[in-house]
Image (cartoon, rainbow, N blue to C red):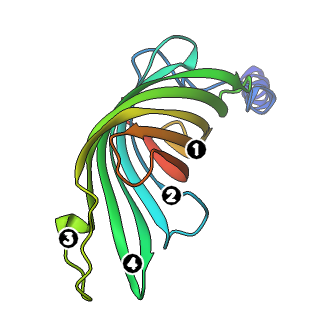
Amino acid sequence: MKKCIAFLLTVILCFVCAGGASAQRTLPGQRGLQVTAGTVNGLNPNEGFYSEIAFSQYVQSANKWVFGIEYLEKRHSYKDLEIPQSQITGDAGYFLNFLSDPHKIFFLSLGASAMAGYETINWNKKLLFDGATITNKDNFIYGGTLTLEMELYLTDRIVFLVNARERLLMGSSVGNFNTQLGLGIKFIIN
């Protein structure tokens, strides 16, 4: 009889305590690998898109360092042709967590990153089909970004990302400011 009561109490305690424990998320030293993609300067991916792969490492208070490589392409119309402006950049930044829920499922962070890379117009093909010549030059670019990022933990190791970024890159011959809206997924690797 005592074994039966002990078993019932154990089962009841399991149901009472279910959902009360928080997972060990955003611990200092925890690392993640993330892939993000989205649109540039609007919601139409035909006008511009970007993709990024990045490595992140959490520090105190769910803050994190992020290091990534990004490809961005904007398209400029010329007659019946779309001329690509491509940027390949590397970035390093720090993200400050300013809002999260007590169960460590939802995090909102603000980040600042330094960027540097290379920009090419029409992959350095200056002469167009009608004889026109592109006068913009390929350039090294540098600057920074401000990012607002939301993390939503789907499991302890899979995180859904939503972000909005404003890039300011000097050295571009076409435009210095670009707004990015993106979605991504992060895999916690340790």
Asked if residue 93 is positioned above or below residue 152 in the image, the reply reads above
Residue 138 on image: x %, y %: 22, 53
Q: Which mark is residue 163?
A: 1
Instruction: Identify the residue under disc 2.
Output: 38
Q: Quadrant of the C terminus?
A: top left
Q: Measuring 42% from the left and 86% from the top, which residue is drawn there? A: 79
Q: Measuring 18% from the left and 64% from the top, which residue is drawn there? A: 124
Mark 3 falls on what kind of element? loop
Residue 108 on image: x %, y %: 65, 31
Nearer the viewer's eye, disc 3 or disc 4?
Answer: 3
Nearer the viewer's eye, disc 4 or disc 2?
Answer: 4
Q: Measuring 32% from the left and 52% from the top, which residue is drawn there? A: 87
Left or right: residue 136 versus residue 159 is left
Q: What separation in Å lies between label 4 and label 2 (alpha carbons)? A: 19 Å
Mark 2 falls on what kind of element? strand
Seen from the viewer's position, the closer of residues 109 and 100 is 109
Q: What separation in Å lies between label 1 and label 3 (alpha carbons)? A: 35 Å
Q: Earlier in the sequence, mark 3 or mark 4?
A: 4
Tell me where residue 130 sits by quadrant: bottom left
- Is residue 12 at all visible to an observer of this figure? yes
Q: What separation in Å lies between label 3 and label 4 (alpha carbons)? A: 14 Å
Q: Residues within 10 Å of mark 3 (few under 14, many from 20)?
A: some
Q: Which mark is residue 126?
A: 3
Q: What separation in Å lies between label 3 and label 2 (alpha carbons)? A: 28 Å
Q: Earlier in the sequence, mark 1 or mark 2?
A: 2
Q: Which mark is residue 82?
A: 4
